[in-house]
């Protein structure tokens, strides 16, 4: 398990916003960083990924236009800005890293090498 620390989850009403943070160590801040989520009874799914050298991002269709992934390379930290939250966004959110050349959001989850602990997001209607 690498050193990734996710934070920022919480309870919010539908339409609200949250910002998740993932602090990585210099060892685990890799070319590809990503956010994933897992709702009760469902499989873990990719939400957003970013290629850290240049900030290229990819998003799941369900969050496009509402979520933004960003990075602070100096701090080896990346973020997930979540706006217009919906009840269906309720899940445990995880951050992950992999030294891969490319990392579309649909990449096989098993390829992600380092994982942080989850941070829970609960959106009420």
Image (cartoon, helix red, strand yellow):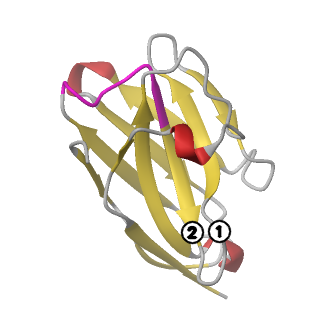
Closer to the camera, 13 or 97? Answer: 97
Left or right of 114, for residue 124: right
To which residue does mark 2 refer? 38
Contact (Cβ within 8 Å) of mark 2 with mark 1: yes
Give above or below for 36 relative to 88: above
Q: Residue 42: x and y, percent?
A: 66, 75
Which region of the structure is painted magenta?
26-33
Q: Residue at x 63, y 50 (%)?
A: 46
- Could you say whether the residue bearing mark 2 is in a helix, strand or loop? strand
Left or right of 76, for residue 65: right
Q: Is residue 11 magenta?
A: no
Q: Residue at x 64, y 77 (%)?
A: 14
Locate residue 65: give its quadrant: top right
To which residue does mark 1 refer? 43
Q: Residues within 10 Å of mark 2 (few under 14, many from 20)?
A: some
- Could you say whether the residue bearing mark 1 is in a helix, strand or loop? loop
Q: Residue 87: x and y, percent?
A: 67, 79
Q: Residue 24: x and y, percent?
A: 25, 37
């Amino acid at each position: 398990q690498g050193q990734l620390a996710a934070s920022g989850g919480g309870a919010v009403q539908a339409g609200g916003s949250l910002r998740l943070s993932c602090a990585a160590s210099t060892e685990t801040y890799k070319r590809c960083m990503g956010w994933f989520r897992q709702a009760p009874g469902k499989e873990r799914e990719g939400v957003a990924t970013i290629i850290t050298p240049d900030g290229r991002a990819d998003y799941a269709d369900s969050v496009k236009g509402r979520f933004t992934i960003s990075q602070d390379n100096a701090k080896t930290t990346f973020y997930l800005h979540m706006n217009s939250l919906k009840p269906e966004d309720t899940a445990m959110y995880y951050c992950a890293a992999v030294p891969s050349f490319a990392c579309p959001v649909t990449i096989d989850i098993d390829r992600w090498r380092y994982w942080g602990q989850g941070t829970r997001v609960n959106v009420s209607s």
